Amino acid sequence: MRLVVRGARAVTLAEGPIPRRGAALRELSVVDRADVVTSGGLIESVGPAGSARAEPGDTVIEAGGRVLMPGFVDCHTHLCSAGDRLDEWERRLRGETYLDILTAGGGIMSTVRAVREMDEAALADGLARRLVLALREGTTTVEVKSGYGLSTVDELKMLRAIRAAAARFPGTVVSTALLGHAKDAAVADFVARTIGETLPAVRREFPASPVDAFCEAGAWSLDECARLFDAAMASGARVRVHADQFTPMGMTEWMIERSAASALAVSVDHLEATAPAALRRLAGSRLFGVMLPCTGFHTDDRYGRGRDFIDAGGALAIATNANPGSSPTWSAPLTIALAVRKLGLTPAEAIAACTVNAAALLGAADRGVIAPGKRADLVLLRHTDERMLAHHIGGNPVDAVIVGSAVVSGDGER
Ligand code: NIG
């Protein structure tokens, strides 16, 4: 099955190193008025307008100068969840902080209680619905974390639900085992049990899933994260971490040191409270920095210093951080719009940070760019200039989503 998009402004991101760092993040390799042919799930060719011959049976989209770009890659989400946190949100609006509520046994633990009450099928159904909503806004590859189970049985339940929802999703879902998201105060030896029991069980059934933790006051300490991650890496797991969201705990520095010796250390995510020197060191390491501008927008108006990180040569990815507590959105376009306003990125940098770089972070080198042989995961915008993605706030800029040569959302027509 072939699909031909004719006369598009193709934002290919095809040239440049992977991951993009520094000034390379600004090079989008745009081909104006391009014909893009896909077949068998892959991009077959990218040529000038008029170069593509449609064959009988081909699906043809006349782009009329609209932007065709790689599907968004959302590399940090908590889309598998249950319940809502509306009451807590109103408490935050009245002045309580995210950490106050977490420390008092709410926040993440509220969602943990709701997830424990829900069975695997219902969790998978809820996730599948949210994935479709993200797809409609152009997300074709999405990472989904566990982390609201916090027991062996419930973490496995979440990861199985993610796998079940992934099987129904036209795009790609990759799971991360967020085993250290919070600590269940009702379990005295929670950290030891997580490392000794939950980690091995998860590694047996989900060997490809990286291991993650939330290093924060009121969540996991530096020492506890280090014990979890050393055990995870010893078993061959890649590790990612939520660090410096509110409190610099030394975790960014720990990851930088580990990354010098091991390719299993992948990313440091959040970075709102990272000291300038640590941010520069992170930029000089082989780790990805992941910034989540919707989180500051929804919580306390604090943001990672994306501009400084890129200027220091860092490999930046941005993501929605979709979750019911700190970032209730799955919108990649909104994330791009906020990254420009709040992280100090240019529109081009924001686009590269949630396509080619996010794909590289997830180890998915087959996507995130438009080039022959790459996966045909594409988004056709209603805009004729990609900067409009960042300029517009709210609304859905996506006219069609293409996964593997099939139009899976929208119809591409004006
Ligand atoms: O990345 N900070 C830790 N984890 C999520 C929030 C999860 C929640 O509040 O439910 C985050 O912001």
Image (spheres, helix red, strand yellow):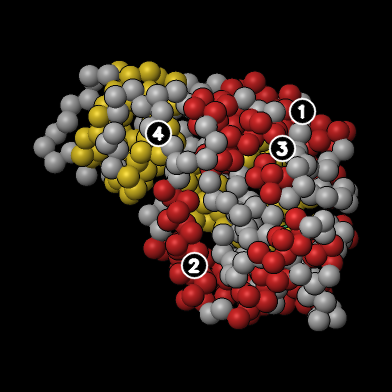
Which residue is located at x 62 percent, y 67 percent?
84
Camera-side residue of 34 and 367: 34
- Residue bearing the label numbered 3: 286
Direction from residue 190 to residue 118 in the image, left or right: left
Which comes before the other along the chain, label 3 or label 1? 3
Which comes before the other along the chain, label 2 or label 1? 2
Q: Secondary structure at mark 2?
A: helix
Q: Amino acid at mark 4?
A: Leu
Residue 308 position, x and y percent, is 76, 28
Which residue is located at x 82 percent, y 77 percent?
185
Q: Nearer the viewer, mark 2 or mark 1?
A: 2
* Quadrant the C terminus occupies: top left
Residue 50 position, x and y percent, is 22, 19
> Disc 4 to disc 1, how far (Cα)?
30 Å
Which comes before the other along the chain, label 3 or label 4? 3
Which comes before the other along the chain, label 2 or label 4? 2
> Disc 2 to disc 4, how far (Cα)?
27 Å
Q: Nearer the viewer, mark 4 or mark 1?
A: 4
Which residue is located at x 73 percent, y 24 percent?
311
Q: Amino acid at mark 2?
A: Gly
Some atom of ligand 1 lies within 8 Å of the CB belonging to the residue at label 3: no
Q: Secondary structure at mark 1?
A: helix
Which residue is located at x 84 percent, y 70 percent?
104
> Disc 2 to disc 1, how far (Cα)?
38 Å
Some atom of ligand 1 lies within 8 Å of the CB belonging to the residue at label 2: no
- Residue bearing the label numbered 2: 126
